[in-house]
Amino acid sequence: MRVLLAGGAGYIGAHVAVALIESGHEVVLLDDLSNTSAVAAERVSVITGAPVPLVVGDASVDAVVEAAFDEHGPFDAIVHLAAYKAVGESLQKPLDYYANNLDTTFALLRTGIARGIRSFLFSSTGTVYSDPADLPFTEESTTSIDLSNAYSKSKRMNEVVLADVARVNPELDVTVLRYFNPVGAHESGLIGEDPSGIPNNLMPFVQRVAVGALEEIGIFGDDYDTPDGTGLRDYIHVVDLAVGHVKALEQGAPGYDVFNLGTGRPVSVRELIASFEKAVGRELPSRVLPRRPGDVAATYCDPAKAQRKLGWTAERTIDDASRDAWNWQSKNPQGFQTA
Ligand code: UFG
């Protein structure tokens, strides 16, 4: 397949690009580089030995998407990972989040459908599930649009749009992938997560503490109703996540379908820190802080549907993710800027 990867130079996008190329597909990246670097695309090319064209542009603008098709099309599929994703920022800038995270989908769908794509793959989030009584979450678990932040709401809104678009385009394969917590890096150490500023998410924060760029890890609450009192999440190695995209494209069938991509194994904040300390070979400073507003005690999925219908299952452990994240961060202490 020839695939247009919107958001393809981002953390997840670069790993999806590698996985697609390694499975024999061709990719073209479309990215505005607002939260990543063109170096990511070059590194995908180094890892795979394949040409990786990068179109620098805003996927929410029809003319930009059309130009990408004119120059690099036709495409069989669009994989849409182009979004703003900082939960805290989305509370401050809801309009930016709704506009960008929906307009990208509209522009990609309009041009993609007009130009005859067969598949549209969308990056969603496990935070669309709203009832903790449903744990572990299956694709049938209750979802809500009444979520705690604009980022998560924008993802759920996208799902609603996509289901309707699929209904009136019965030949189109529309697949929604609900990610749990992506962590880790490619084993080469050439690509990995490179958030700008102070990381919001746990693993990149721990990575920065390990290279000495930040002083200590803050543990957001140790009084949750969980085995060690800290929050439980379903951390999935980004390479496993990327392979899930390939399987979804290859196994896809016309119509709308949704898959959880997670491990099904909850890991606590303290367990993640311990795993990372093992990878680094020393203890890392940490301190318990108050709970972070909006956090839930636990979220993890039942990944059985992806196994059954896509033949996909997460193979890597949290220790693999810690090892690979440390390999990436220690070789690139300032992320892609080091290059
Ligand atoms: N945590 C800490 N210290 C930190 C950061 C996080 O203790 O410095 C804890 C959190 O309280 C939580 C766990 O680590 O228990 C995971 O937090 P992350 O921020 O890494 O991940 P979240 O589960 O909050 O985020 C997930 C996805 C995001 C998505 C978000 C929506 O990873 O992509 O849900 O709420 F945007």
Image (tube, rainbow, N blue to C red):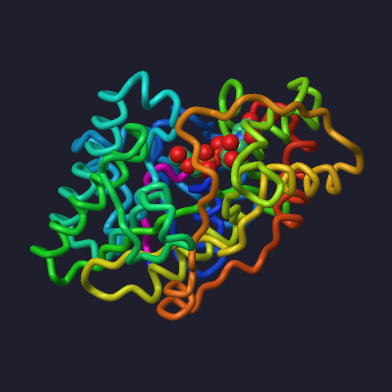
Residue at image point 36% right, 40% down:
152
| Residue 338: % across, % down | 71, 28
| Residue 109: % across, % down | 20, 50
Q: Is residue 196 above or below residue 180?
A: above
The front one of 142 and 37 is 142
Ligand 1 - quadrant of the structure image: top right
Compared across the picture, whether 285 is left or right of 156 comes to right
Q: Is residue 55 magenta?
A: no
Q: Is residue 48 above or below residue 247?
A: above
The front one of 168 and 47 is 168
Q: How many marks?
A: 0
Compared across the picture, whether 326 is left or right of 98 comes to right
Residue at image point 80% right, 45% down:
274
| Residue 250: % across, % down | 40, 73
Indicate the quadrant where residue 236 lies.
bottom right
What residue range appears in magenta?
A: 2-9
Residue at image point 56% right, 25% down:
196
Q: Answer yes or no: is residue 40 visible.
A: no
Compared across the picture, whether 92 is left or right of 113 comes to right
